[in-house]
């Protein structure tokens, strides 16, 4: 008997936060698959009707197929959602080699996990497949396991699903969908070729993505200040244990720095300035010496400046080696937050310092900026595994605000309706298509038009 709501399967589920949005759009998840047992436990707490499949999907994908079949019988899932690991693609990771270096790309086996998605899709034949990843997913070259030719993971997946699915790539900043952070992500939506929705999309000259609700040009992105004001969390300070946590909100806690150099360095960055500690020309002894851009110590007293410095074994100081563009920086309150990452608890990571207070953002605030609902069930994750594990789950989540919007247009398409869809001529479609063209050899590209 047909289900009252369309069934769905999730691969690389993380904590299940992204799939909460699809669930709000009335997709019912029957299987959640995740390599980390801890993350899977959180996912299942938020998708209680799903069966959990733990372990490496390269070895457990058949169990995903069997689990769905045991629940739904011969019925096909309406949706297969997948968010394969992005670490081998992400610009936040070093040592990946150049984007066009296919051999370097293939050294990280996670970059070829799209094969698992294709295996499950070709067995279960879902009506729609949605894959999310960082922008480099569309163009980062790996070696094609079929012939050792350079190809991107996105193009490989398209080939593996061809001709049974029509592919619709999309590259967007999720700030355009009301998410209060700058989060550029690639989406690939595949619709089964025999679905009436394919012809409907062609006739309407649209793609299966929701119309954006905001833009930088219109000046209506949600700012960090507005998002934090909406949350209404208690002010915190990293100077002491008591000031760094809110006992009534276990997720609202930050690392304690005490009165050390790091705390004083952050405190020296003017509130609401979006400023960087690299630019602080302050000597704590208030010497009036000129300070150069690469100076680590005061020329007069020899004390370290309130900058990111490291003390060498001989007692000398130098500036921290690394990116100076955005690390050790306060977030701007009048703009969306920078991308929330797994390293949100580290002051030296990309723009993690609170815009006003002397601390990083708390897991509660990061979850809010990721649009994870307030009633999301974290269970004992914070107590049992610590804030680092929770921050990682939050940083790798797909914002549910977008997936709910996406899920609603997908559900409408499956129901024969073309409403609220983005034009096929939208710049987000063009950018994704252009980037995918970098992910294939010239002869391969021409063969696919």
Image (cartoon, rainbow, N blue to C red):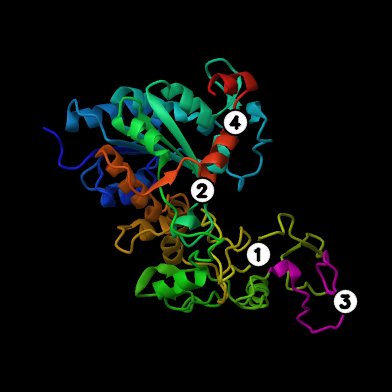
Disc 3: which residue = 290
Q: What residue sits right under mark 1 in the picture?
A: 328
The CA distance from mark 2 to mark 3 is 44 Å
Query: Please, what secondary structure does the residue beneath circle 3 have?
Result: loop
Instruction: Identify the secondary structure beneath mark 4.
Output: helix
What secondary structure characterizes most of the magenta part? Answer: loop
Q: Earlier in the sequence, mark 2 or mark 3?
A: 2
- The reply to whether the C-beta atoms of the residues labelled 3 and 4 are less than 8 Å apart is no
Q: Where the C terminus falls, by quadrant?
A: top right
- Per the rendering, the mark at residue 404 is none
Q: Earlier in the sequence, mark 4 or mark 1?
A: 1
* Alpha carbons under labels 2 and 4: distance apart: 17 Å
Residue 129 percent across, percent down from the top left: 37, 34
Please identify, in this view, whether the residue under mark 4 or under mark 1 is nearer the observer.
Answer: 4
Q: Quadrant of residue 131?
A: top left
Which residue is label 2 attached to? 172
Label located before the other in sequence (2 or 1): 2
Q: Quadrant of the N terminus?
A: top left
What segment carries the magenta color? 276-302
- Work out whether mark 1 precedes mark 3 in sequence or the reverse, and give the earlier one: 3
| Sequence-first tag of 3 and 4 | 3
Compute the Cα span from label 3 to label 4: 51 Å
């Amino acid at each position: 008997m047909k289900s009252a709501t369309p069934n769905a399967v999730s691969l690389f589920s993380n904590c299940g936060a992204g799939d909460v949005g699809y669930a709000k759009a009335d997709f019912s998840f029957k299987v959640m698959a995740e390599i980390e047992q801890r993350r899977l436990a959180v996912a299942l707490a938020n998708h209680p009707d799903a069966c959990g499949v733990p372990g490496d999907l390269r070895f457990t994908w058949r169990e995903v197929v069997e689990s769905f079949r045991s629940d739904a019988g011969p019925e096909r899932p309406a949706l297969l959602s997948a968010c394969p690991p992005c670490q081998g693609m992400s610009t936040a990771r070093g040592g990946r080699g150049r984007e066009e270096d296919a051999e370097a790309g293939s050294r990280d086996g996670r970059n070829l996990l799209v094969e698992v998605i294709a295996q499950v899709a070709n067995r279960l034949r879902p009506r729609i497949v949605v894959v999310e990843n960082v922008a480099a997913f569309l163009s980062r070259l790996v070696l094609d396991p079929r012939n050792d030719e350079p190809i991107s993971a996105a193009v490989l997946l398209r080939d593996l699903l061809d001709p049974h699915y029509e592919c619709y790539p999309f590259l967007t900043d999720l700030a355009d969908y009301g998410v209060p952070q700058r989060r550029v992500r690639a989406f690939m939506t595949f619709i089964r070729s025999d679905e009436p929705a394919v012809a409907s999309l062609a006739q309407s000259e649209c793609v299966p993505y929701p119309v954006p609700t905001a833009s930088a040009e219109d000046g209506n992105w949600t700012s960090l200040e507005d998002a934090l004001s909406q949350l209404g969390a208690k002010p915190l300070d990293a100077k002491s244990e008591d000031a760094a946590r809110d006992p009534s909100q276990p997720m609202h806690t930050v690392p304690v720095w005490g009165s050390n150099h790091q705390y004083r360095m952050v405190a020296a960055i003017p509130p609401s300035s979006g400023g960087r500690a690299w630019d602080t020309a302050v000597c704590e002894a208030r010497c009036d010496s000129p300070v150069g851009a690469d100076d680590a110590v005061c020329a007069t007293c020899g004390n370290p400046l309130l900058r990111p410095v490291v003390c060498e074994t001989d007692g000398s100081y130098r500036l921290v080696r690394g990116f100076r563009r955005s690390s050790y920086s306060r977030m701007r309150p009048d703009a969306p937050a920078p991308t929330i990452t797994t390293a949100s608890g580290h002051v030296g990571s990309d723009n993690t310092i609170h815009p006003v207070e002397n601390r990083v953002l708390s897991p509660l605030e990061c979850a809010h900026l990721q649009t994870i609902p307030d009633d999301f069930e974290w269970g004992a994750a914070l107590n049992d595994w610590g804030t680092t594990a929770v921050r990682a789950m939050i940083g790798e989540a797909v914002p549910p605000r977008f997936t709910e919007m996406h899920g609603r247009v997908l559900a409408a398409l499956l129901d024969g309706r073309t409403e609220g869809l983005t034009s096929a001529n939208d710049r987000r479609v063009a950018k994704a298509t252009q980037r995918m063209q970098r992910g294939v050899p010239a002869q391969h590209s021409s063969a696919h038009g």
